[in-house]
Image: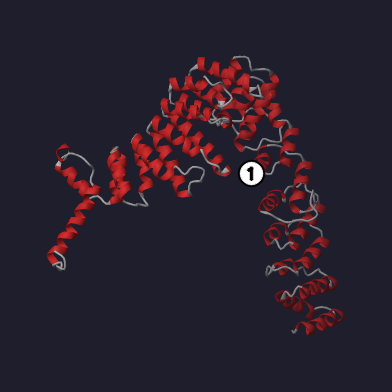
Amino acid sequence: MPGKRNTKSDLDQQACSDACGSCRRTLPHSNPGAASCLEQIDTLLLTVDEAIVEAARSGQAAWLKQLLSAYNSEEAPKSLVEAASNGRLECVTILQAKFFDRGDDKLSNSLWRIMEQAVESARANGHASILNSLLPEIFNSGDACRGVHTIIIGEQILNAAAGNGHHGAVKSIIQHAIRRNYSKTIKQSAAVTRAISGEHTAVVEYLLSFGGSMWNLVEAFVAAIDKKNNTLADRIFKLYLDTAPEKELLLRLAYRDGCTNAIKYLYGNGQNNARLIGEAFICSAERGHIGTMTFLLNTTRAAFEAAMKSRGTKSLDAVRFLFSKGRPPPVAVNDMFETTHCVEMMKLLYELTSVSKRSIIAVFEEAAGVVLRKRAYFRYNDDKLDIVKMLHKDTCIPAKVISEAFVIAARYDQAQLVELMQDDTRISEESRCEAFKAAAACQTEGLMESLFRESFCSDTIWVAFKQAYLSRKRANVKFLLNLVCEGDQDLRNKVVLNAVKFGE
C-alpha cells in the first residue's frame, strides 16, 4: 500500500527473493528429476565462476549462455580451455563469439595464452572439430611477431598430434595450414618421425602423401630403421634424394649420435665409397660417436688416418678409441697437440704418445707468454697455467725459454708458478735477478722475498727498491730497506733519499 513502511520481515523476504533469483540464474534450466539430489546440491553451492566452468566442461550450452548474459565474469574466458579439452564444440563457439572474436583487433596477451592452451587441450584429446574451430583464431593475427609464434605453436601441435596418433587432429591442422597458405612455413617438422615412433601407420601414410619437403626426413629415416621397417625406410630415402640438396645421407647421419644402425643400412645399400666413409668417420670422430666410429673403422683403414689428421677431433673418448685401434701417425699427434684448445686432450696426448720436442716447446712458449701469437698482449688463464705446470719439467725445453717463462711468471704475480720453477737449474742468474726486480711491484706478499739471493748485487736491489717504491708496496720497501742496511754506502744514500719521500 502507498505510504506503508517496510517492516524487517518485508525486507528479509525481499532479500530472500533476490537471492533465489540469483540462484535460479546460476542453476541450469533442467528438470529437477533428471539429476540426482546430490548433483543439484553441488550445483547450488557453485560460485558464478565455477558455474561457468562447469557449464563449459559439461557441454550445457543453454546454461552457459544464461550465465554469460546474467553475469560479467573476468574468469569466464578461461572456461574455453575446459570446453576444448572435453570436446564441447557448441560451448567453444559461444565462448569464442563472446570473448575472442575481435575482428581486426588483436587479442590481449591473456586471451592469447588462453587460446593457445585451448588449442593444445583440443589436440591432446584428439578433438578435431574443436581444432577446426580454434585454429583460424590463433592463426588470424595481424601481429607479425605473434604470427611467427603461432606458426611455431602450430608445428608443435602437429608434431604432438602425430605422435599420439590423433589422425583427425593431424588432418585438421594440415588442411588448415594448406587453406591459409601456412604449409609453406612447415620445414623440417618432426611429425613423420613422431608418427613412425608411435607406430601410427595411418598418420604416417597421410603425412607422406604430401611429399617430403615439410618433414625432417633424416630423423624419419632413422626412426624407420629403428622400427625395423625397411620398406618404409626405402621410401623415405627416395623422398630424401628427391628433395634434399645434400644427397649423401650417410654423411648427415655421421653428425648425429645413435644412428649406427641407419649408417649400416645405407652402407649395405650402396653408400660405401672410400671418400664418403672417410668423411663420415671424421665427422663421427669429431663428435665422439664411438658406435659409428667402430663400424666405419672396420670398413677401411684409411678412415683412421683421416680422423687422426683432422683438427676437429675434440672428443677425449674418440681419441682414446683411436689410440686403442692402432699407433697414430706422429705428424697427426703433433698437429693435434699444438692446435687443440682442450687441456685434457693435451694431457692425454702428452701421456699416451711421443709428442715431438718442437711441439712441446711451441705449446709451452705460447702458454707461458714467451711468444705472442695473434695478440699484442699476454694474460694468463686457467688453461695456460695448467699447461705450464704440466710441461715446465720437460727436459726438452731450453734454458733460455724456461728462464724467460720464470721472469714472466714473477712479473704477472703468479706465485704458484714461481714456486714450481724456482729450483730449476736451467734458470740463469740474470733471469733470477729480473724476476726479483719484477716481483718488487707485485701484490703477493712474500713473493719478492722468496726470490732473493745473497748473490744479488746492489744495483739489482736498488732497481727492486725503486719498483717497490713507485708501486707503493710498503712490505717490499721495508724488506729492501733491511737489505740496504747491510749494503754499501752509495746504495744506502740512494735509498734513504727516497725513503724520506715515502714517509719511512
Q: Which of the 4 image quarters holds residue 293? A: top right
Q: Which of the 4 image quarters holds residue 199? A: top left
Q: Residue furthest right?
A: 490
Q: Residue at x 48, y 35 (%)?
A: 136
The residue nearer to you, when weighing 250 against 205, is 205
Q: Amino acid at mark 1?
A: Glu
Q: Which of the 4 image quarters holds residue 35? A: top left
What residue did someone put label 1 on?
Answer: 344
- Label 1 neighbour load within 10 Å: few <14, some 14-19, many 20+: some
Residue 296 screen position, x and y as percent? 62, 23
Q: Residue at x 65, y 27 (%)?
A: 281
Residue 318 screen position, x and y as percent? 62, 33
- As drawn, is 231 to the left or to the right of 329? left
Residue 315 screen position, x and y as percent? 62, 37
- In the picture, the quarter occupied by the C terminus is bottom right
Residue 68 visible from this viewpoint? yes
- In the picture, the quarter occupied by the N terminus is bottom left
The residue nearer to you, when weighing 245 against 329, is 245
Element on which disc 1 rests: helix
Residue 468 screen position, x and y as percent? 76, 73
